[in-house]
Image (cartoon, rainbow, N blue to C red):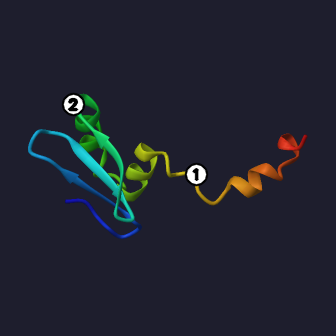
Amino acid sequence: MGQDAQGFRYVERGDGSVVIHHHGRVAATLRGGRAAEFLAEIDDDPQLVMARWTGNYRRGNERTARQHPRNRG
């Protein structure tokens, strides 16, 4: 089972699929080649890898990006 330090954890199932949870809710289910690729990458920084794979890595910077001069209407 994966780490639970920053809200993400993962479970590798017997059929080879991987389920990623974020704060107790299912965030992603990976199967086949994607699951194998995820498991190969998970050793680096598990929380960051799970955030990238689920799309939850951008939280917290949306307001500053909206206020950037390039993004103003």
Q: Amino acid at mark 1?
A: Arg
Q: Which residue corresponds to the image point at 74% horizontal and 57% vertical from the top-left? A: 63
Query: What mark, if any, has residue 14 been given in the picture?
Result: none
Q: Between marks 1 and 2, how big is the CA–CA gap?
A: 26 Å
Q: Earlier in the sequence, mark 1 or mark 2?
A: 2
Percent coordinates x, y for residue 29 in the rendering: 30, 42
Figure quadrant of the C terminus:
top right
Circle 2 SS class: helix
Badge 1, how many Cα within 10 Å: few under 14, some, many 20+? few
Residue 17 occupies quadrant: top left
Residue 14 occupies quadrant: top left
Viewer-side residue, 56 vs 36: 56
Viewer-side residue, 37 vs 55: 55
Farthest top residue in view: 33
Residue 58, compared with residue 1, is above or below; it is above
Label 1–label 2 contact, CB within 8 A: no
In the image, taking residue 16 as reference, residue 21 lies left or right, namely: right
Q: Which residue corresponds to the image point at 36% horizontal and 70% vertical from the top-left? A: 5
Q: Which residue corresponds to the image point at 21% horizontal and 54% vertical from the top-left? A: 11
Q: Which residue corresponds to the image point at 43% horizontal and 54% vertical from the top-left? A: 48
Percent coordinates x, y for residue 12 in the rendering: 18, 49
Percent coordinates x, y for residue 68 in the rendering: 83, 49
Q: Which residue is mark 1?
A: 58
Q: Amino acid at mark 2?
A: Gly
Farthest bottom residue in view: 5
Percent coordinates x, y for residue 35 in the rendering: 25, 38
Viewer-side residue, 62 vs 42: 62
Query: What mark, if any, has residue 32 been given in the picture?
Result: 2
Farthest front residue in view: 25
Residue 5, compared with residue 37, is above or below; it is below
Badge 2, how many Cα within 10 Å: few under 14, some, many 20+? few
In the image, taking residue 63 as reference, residue 25 lies left or right, namely: left
